[in-house]
Image: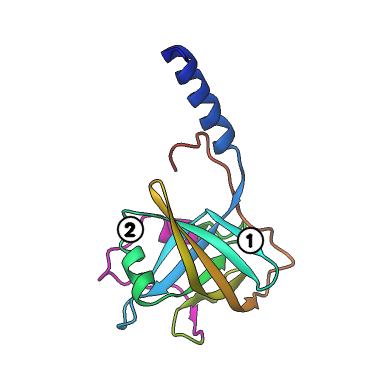
């Protein structure tokens, strides 16, 4: 049986290592299927399959976007470049469901009317095909239907997120 000191030390180590696990930075865009659209900063995105091409993405259970993804499962994952910090400033604070999330942002249309960020390094258009609850997040499997490579896809490096602690953003 572990002592409280051993448990605390082990949790601190887990937090340090999890936090140093790198992840990409994306802006997830979605709609509610009724004409409202939003975007949020997403860093827990990972390729999950070659065929069909698919990624997983995690969304905190407290976000209203989970309800939207049930009603309207089409999404766009916009890849943020290392030089594109303005996207972090704009989308990092989050938006309420009725707030306009794309004011001042150049967007592109996609097949399912989900806005894509025209200036992103690139974007993946997909549909949620499955989900699983994982602690305080919901992990979605997104099958990729199409993609767009931006003008700077080969010039700018993707932004990478590394946290100090794996137990909070």
- In this picture, residue 43 sits left or right of residue 64: right
- Magenta residues (range): 87-110
Majority secondary structure of magenta residues: loop
- In this picture, residue 143 sits left or right of residue 49: left
Q: Nearer the viewer, residue 139 or 88?
A: 139
Q: Pointer 2: what residue?
A: 63
Looking at the rendered structure, the secondary structure element under dot 2 is loop
Q: Earlier in the sequence, mark 2 or mark 1?
A: 1
Q: Is residue 150 visible?
A: yes
Instruction: Find the distance from the CA under tag 2 to the CA under tag 1.
Output: 22 Å
Please determine whether, in this image, residue 19 is positioned above or below residue 58.
above
The image quadrant that residue 120 belongs to is bottom right
Q: Pointer 1: what residue?
A: 47
Residue 79 at x, y percent in the picture: 58, 65
For the point 31% across and 67% down, the residue is 67
For the point 57% across and 42% down, the residue is 162
94 drawn magenta: yes
């Amino acid at each position: 049986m572990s002592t409280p000191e051993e448990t605390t030390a082990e949790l601190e180590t887990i937090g340090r290592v999890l936090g140093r696990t790198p992840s990409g930075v994306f802006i997830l865009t979605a709609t509610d299927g009724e004409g409202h659209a939003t975007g949020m900063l997403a860093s827990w995105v990972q390729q999950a399959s070659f065929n069909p091409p698919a990624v997983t993405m995690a969304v905190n259970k407290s976000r209203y976007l989970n309800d939207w993804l049930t009603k309207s499962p089409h999404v766009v994952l916009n890849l943020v470049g290392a030089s594109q910090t303005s996207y972090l400033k704009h989308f990092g604070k989050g938006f309420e469901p009725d707030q306009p999330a794309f004011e001042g942002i150049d967007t592109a249309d996609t097949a399912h009317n989900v806005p894509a960020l025209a200036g992103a390094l690139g974007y993946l258009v997909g549909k949620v095909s499955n989900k699983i609850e994982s602690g305080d997040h919901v992990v979605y499997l997104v099958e990729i239907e199409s993609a767009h490579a931006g003008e700077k896809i080969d010039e700018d490096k993707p932004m990478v997120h590394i946290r100090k602690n794996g137990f909070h953003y």
